Amino acid sequence: MPKLLPATHAEKWVQDVYNMDASQAQKEKIWLSRMRTVIKRAGDGVYRESQKLNAIIERYNQILRLRKLIKPGDTIYTTLDHVSASGMMRHITAHVIKKNRPIMLNYAISVITDTPMTDRGSLKIGGCGMDMGFHVVYSLSYCLYRYGVKCTGPGCNSNDHNNGDQDYTTPRNHGDGGYAINHSWL
Ligand SMILES: [Zn+2]
């Protein structure tokens, strides 16, 4: 029997991409392919079964799924389901609209950004003093585009353009992927 690898082995292998001596675009490719490889290896029984392994696999599955479903420049719409009496806790629901139909993203966002959900399926967001709907979308976008994002051209939402940079035509990468997806309240 070959020795089974721990889940941390898979996690470290995927995280290691960050420190590679490669361009952001190359890192992104390697990162995506390593997540797919880990999912396949888990199916082949390379790793030791554990809750942690299940969590990692589910996270990678959801990242790859949302990377296909949502594209840079798309908008995620949030609704406020509930505010706690203290004002310190918000329950938020997120949707993206595809082919004229809303697709609920709460579960995927919960898994990808490690955010708890309520019994009713809302995202449970603590804290206040900032736009928590924006925070949800920024955090997700950052996890999906952790190696930055290509400029989407005119209308591109990157904060790079807020700093006086009005160049929307030269093909290039923005370092902060958190702005890849737009946010709007419903
Ligand atoms: Zn841009």
Image (cartoon, rainbow, N blue to C red):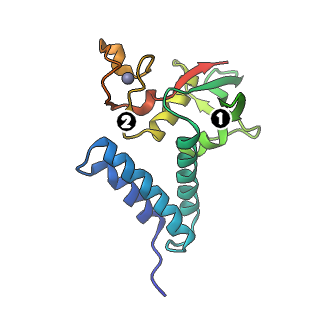
Give the vertical position of 167 relative to 46 (above or below): above
Depth check, mark 2 against mark 1: the one in front is 2
Q: Position of residue 68 (x, y in %)?
A: 55, 43
Residue at image position (50%, 26%) is 73
**Is residue 147 toward the left or the right of residue 56 in the image?**
left
- Name the amino acid type tagged 2: Gly
CB atoms of marks 2 and 1 within 8 Å: no
Give the vertical position of 181 relative to 30 (above or below): above
**Is residue 67 toward the left or the right of residue 102 in the image?**
left
In the depicted view, which residue is nearer to us: 98 or 49?
Answer: 98
Q: Position of residue 69 (x, y in %)?
A: 59, 39
- Name the amino acid type tagged 1: Leu
Please tell me in which quarter of the rendered image ligand 1 is found: top left
State which tag comes first along the sequence, 2 or 1: 1
The number of discs equals: 2
Residue 54 appears in view: yes
Residue at image position (45%, 17%) is 155
Quarter of the C terminus within the rendering: top right
Residue 84 appears in view: no
Residue 136 sits in quarter: top right
Residue at the limit of the structure toward the right, as seen here: 120
Q: Is label 1 in a helix, a strand or a loop?
A: strand
Give the vertical position of 74 relative to 115 (above or below): above
Residue at image position (65%, 21%) is 86
In the depicted view, which residue is nearer to us: 8 or 151?
Answer: 151
The residue identified by callout 1 is 123
The residue identified by callout 2 is 148
Residue at image position (40%, 56%) is 14
Give the vertical position of 115 relative to 99 (above or below): below
Residue 131 sits in quarter: top right
Q: Is label 2 in a helix, a strand or a loop?
A: loop
Label 2 to label 1: alpha-carbon separation? 25 Å
